[in-house]
Amino acid sequence: MAAVNLKELAKILNLSISTVSKALRDSHEIGASTKERVLAKAKELDYSPNPFASGLRRNKSKTVAVVVPEVANNYFALAINGIESVAQEKDYHVLIYLTHEDFEKEKRIMKHLENKRVDGILMSVTMHTNQCDHLFDIQQKGIPIVMFDRICHEIETAKITTDDYISGMNATKHLIDNGAKDIAFLSLGDEVSIVQKRKSGFLEELEKNNIVTAPNRIVNCNDSDESNYQKIKNLLKGKQRPDAIFASVEKLATTTYEVCKELKINIPQDLKIICFSNLATASLLSPSLSTITQPAYEIGKTAAEVMFKYLDKNKTYIPNENIVLHSTLFIRDSSQNLSK
């Protein structure tokens, strides 16, 4: 009988891949009886030796891979700079892979990296990544992963994020304090971990202020600029348009500016706008754009520091660790009540 892989082993045991992976790594999250059962079945079925047991990959390539959805986004450009600053100090090369929000491409990149000699992977998943089998496979090959920004919760490793939930609440409170009573939220993929948290913070703050939002005030956008433009235009061209917009990502805010220009909607008199953004020119827009700005450079730098902490010790197993850095609310003209 051919040796089974991790996915097949999990299916035979009727356990999740995450549970089996953690059991094989002797995670404290898994009970002793489950660990014994998993290890016994792995031995019985000739499951390939777990590379995490030794914690060593002896032949270093002095190369790490960075896998991100795009680089046109200011956030990811800054995060990569942070990663490279640490890698350069360690005399490591950085290979950058772009998924372009394509889950199938993300899986192909991971498959490629299984066979390519990289010492570690730092990554942010696509907006369509809803399962993590391909990431478990990488870990089982002895290649450590550190996740930043958009993460897979099922993967046991270090995860570096920002305080999206609290920031979502703070941004919404700011709009309400400046007179907004009918706020629309522009979402980008409900499967994205950061967007879920931002929307949850938005809805929590509305509830705290006894504001009921209609279903059409949550606009589910996608990775098509043309489609998003039309969705935002449809939202704003009717008589019952909202008086404020909270954009979950930068590009949806800039698209809103374009729509407002076409429809001759004045910002912020007719419509207030705020968004998550690392746009360096936010203060130069007309009107200047209010933003929740993430510490993107520091997030990338922290992710790399965590990765090299383990690589320097020749360890490929990185235990669960959630590191949360704080974003900053920059209030500018686009969200203020200028009549005050």
Image (tube, rainbow, N blue to C red):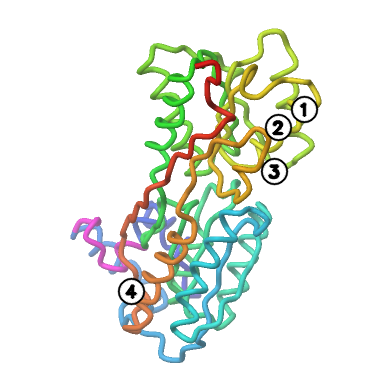
Q: Which residue is mark 2?
A: 257
Q: Residue at x 55, y 66 (%)?
A: 80
Residue 242, position in %: x, y? 61, 16
Q: Are the two marked residues, 2 and 1, in contact with CB atoms closer than 8 angstroms?
A: yes
Magenta-colored span: 21-31
Q: Residue at x 53, y 25 (%)?
A: 336
Q: Are the two marked residues, 4 and 1, in contact with CB atoms closer than 8 angstroms?
A: no
In the picture provided, is 90 more to the left or to the right than 24?
Answer: right
The residue positioned farthest toward the front in the image shown: 340
Q: Of helix, strand and loop, which one carries label 4?
A: helix
Camera-near label (4 vs 2) is: 2
Q: Are the two marked residues, 3 and 2, in contact with CB atoms closer than 8 angstroms?
A: no
In the picture provided, is 10 more to the left or to the right than 244?
Answer: left
Q: Which residue is mark 3?
A: 223
Please name the amino acid that badge 3 sits on.
Asp
Q: Are the two marked residues, 3 and 1, in contact with CB atoms closer than 8 angstroms?
A: no
**Magenta region includes residue 27:** yes
Q: Earlier in the sequence, mark 4 or mark 1?
A: 4
Q: Earlier in the sequence, mark 4 or mark 2?
A: 4
Q: Of helix, strand and loop, which one carries label 1?
A: helix
Rendered image quadrant of residue 43: bottom left
Rendered image quadrant of residue 42: bottom left
Question: Measured along the vertical axis of the image, is residue 140 above or below residue 22?
Answer: below
Label 1 Cα crowd, 10 Å radius (few <14 / some 14-19 / many 20+): few
Label 4 Cα crowd, 10 Å radius (few <14 / some 14-19 / many 20+): few
Q: Which residue is mark 4?
A: 43
Q: Are the two marked residues, 4 and 2, in contact with CB atoms closer than 8 angstroms?
A: no
Q: Main secondary structure of the magenta part?
A: loop
Camera-near label (3 vs 2) is: 2
Q: Which residue is mark 1?
A: 261
Residue 82, position in %: x, y? 49, 67
